[in-house]
C-alpha cells in the first residue's frame, strides 16, 4: 500500500490523514481486536512527514502554522471515520473483497459469503453536515457530538450495560443526561443516520435451504483478527529472510509488507503458508 490519504469527514479540525505502507512492525503489535489495538495500529501508520489541515491538504513541516497541529491524536478521531480508515487499510493490504465461510443455523451446511468493501462504503456514505465544531441536532432540540475512540476507551472501564448509557450521555451536549432508554434509542438512531459505523448485521441466504439469517460484520474486528491470525506466518517470513540474508529482525519488520513477501517468494519460501 503506497502512502494513502484518507479523508476525515466527521472529525472536527482535520481534513484527513496520510498513512504509510503497512510493515511487519505494525502487524506485530496487533494482539486483540479492541479499540486500543485499532488506535495503536493507525497511530503507527501515520505518515511522519505530513501535517494535517482542516481543509484536508497536506503541507511539509516548514510550512506548518503555529496553530496547526503536526499530528492528530488518533483517539479523538470520530468512530465512523476510524472505521473508514480501517477499511482503507484492509483494502490496501488484502484488496476490497471480504470473504467468509458461514454455517447455516437451519440446515448446518457451510456456505460462502462474499462482498466488496467498496460497495459497502458506497452504500453507507458519511454525512458531513454539521457546524465547524462537529455538533449535530436530533430534531428534538437536543445537540450532540459523535463518539470517538477516547470515549470508547473511557466507556470500556464500565460494565457493558452501563458503558453504552455513559457513552451516549457523554455525547449529549444539551438536554442533559436523561438515562431514558427511549431517548437513548432515538439518539443512537440519529447518530447512525449521520455517521453509520461499519459494525452491522447483514442478511445472508443459505444456498442449500434458502434460510435467511443475520450475520454480524465488524470492520475493526475483521481486520484486526485477520492480522492477528497471520502472526505465525509473519514469524516464518522473518525466519526465511533472516536465514537467507542474515538481516536483523528489526530490519525485516521495517520492510513494507508486500516487499517482505516478495523477498520470501524470491528466496523460494515454499514452506511459508500463503
Image (cartoon, rainbow, N blue to C red):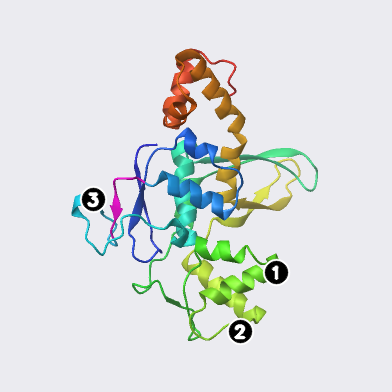
Q: Is residue 170 above or below residue 8?
A: below
Q: Which residues are magenta?
A: 47-53
Q: Earlier in the sequence, mark 2 or mark 3?
A: 3
Q: Residue furthest right?
A: 107
Q: Main secondary structure of the magenta part?
A: loop
Percent x, y for residue 165? 63, 73
Q: Nearer the viewer, residue 70 or 80?
A: 70
Residues tagged 1 and 3 counted as in contact (Cβ below 8 A): no
For label 2, the crowd category at 10 Å Cα-Cα, with few meaning under 14, some 14 to 19 and many 20 or more, is: few
Q: Residues within 10 Å of mark 3 (few under 14, many from 20)?
A: few
Q: Residue at x 54, y 41 (%)?
A: 29
| Above/below status of 266 relative to 207 | above
Residue 50 falls within the magenta-colored stretch: yes
Which residue is identified by label 1? 161
Task: Look at the image and tell me whether residue 206 can be seen.
Answer: yes
Compared to residue 146, the image places residue 116 above or below, namely above
Q: Is residue 86 above or below residue 110?
A: below
Is residue 229 toward the left or the right of residue 75 in the image?
Answer: right
Residue receiving disc 2? 178
Mark pair 1, 3: CA separation:
45 Å
Residue mark closest to the camera, 2 vs 3: 3
Residue 196, can we see it? Answer: no
Who's the residue at 49% across and 42% down the image? 90
Q: Which residue is mark 3?
A: 61
The answer to whether residue 97 is magenta is: no
Residue depth check, mark 1 versus mark 3: number of the one nearer the observer: 3
Mark closer to the chain start, 2 or 1: 1
Disc 3 secondary structure class: helix
The percent position of residue 34, horizontal first and vertical second, equals 59, 52
Q: Residue at x 36, y 52 (%)?
A: 17
Amino acid at each position: 500500500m503506497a502512502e494513502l490519504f484518507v479523508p476525515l469527514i466527521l472529525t472536527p479540525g482535520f481534513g484527513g490523514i496520510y498513512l504509510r505502507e503497512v510493515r511487519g512492525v505494525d502487524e506485530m503489535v496487533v494482539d486483540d481486536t479492541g479499540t486500543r489495538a485499532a488506535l495503536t495500529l493507525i497511530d503507527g501508520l501515520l505518515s511522519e512527514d505530513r501535517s494535517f489541515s482542516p481543509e484536508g491538504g497536506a503541507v511539509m513541516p516548514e510550512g506548518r502554522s503555529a496553530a496547526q497541529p503536526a499530528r492528530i491524536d488518533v483517539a479523538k478521531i470520530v468512530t465512523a471515520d476510524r472505521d473508514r480508515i480501517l477499511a482503507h487499510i484492509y483494502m490496501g493490504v488484502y484488496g476490497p473483497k471480504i470473504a467468509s465461510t458461514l454455517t447455516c443455523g437451519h440446515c448446518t451446511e457451510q456456505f460462502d459469503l462474499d462482498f466488496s468493501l467498496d460497495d459497502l462504503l458506497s452504500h453507507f456514505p458519511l454525512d458531513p453536515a454539521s457546524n465547524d465544531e462537529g455538533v449535530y441536532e436530533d430534531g428534538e432540540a437536543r445537540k450532540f457530538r459523535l463518539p470517538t475512540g477516547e470515549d470508547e476507551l473511557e466507556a470500556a472501564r464500565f460494565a457493558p450495560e452501563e458503558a453504552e448509557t455513559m457513552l451516549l450521555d457523554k455525547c449529549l451536549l444539551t438536554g442533559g443526561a436523561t438515562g431514558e432508554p427511549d431517548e437513548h434509542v432515538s439518539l443512537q438512531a440519529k447518530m447512525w443516520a449521520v455517521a453509520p459505523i461499519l459494525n452491522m448485521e447483514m442478511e445472508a441466504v443459505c444456498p442449500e435451504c434458502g434460510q435467511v439469517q443475520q450475520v454480524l460484520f465488524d470492520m475493526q474486528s475483521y481486520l484486526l483478527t485477520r492480522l492477528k491470525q497471520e502472526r505465525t506466518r509473519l514469524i516464518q517470513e522473518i525466519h526465511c529472510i533472516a536465514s537467507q540474508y542474515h538481516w536483523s529482525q528489526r530490519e525485516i519488520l521495517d520492510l513494507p509488507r508486500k516487499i517482505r513477501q516478495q523477498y520470501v517468494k524470491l528466496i523460494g519460501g515454499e514452506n511459508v503458508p500463503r
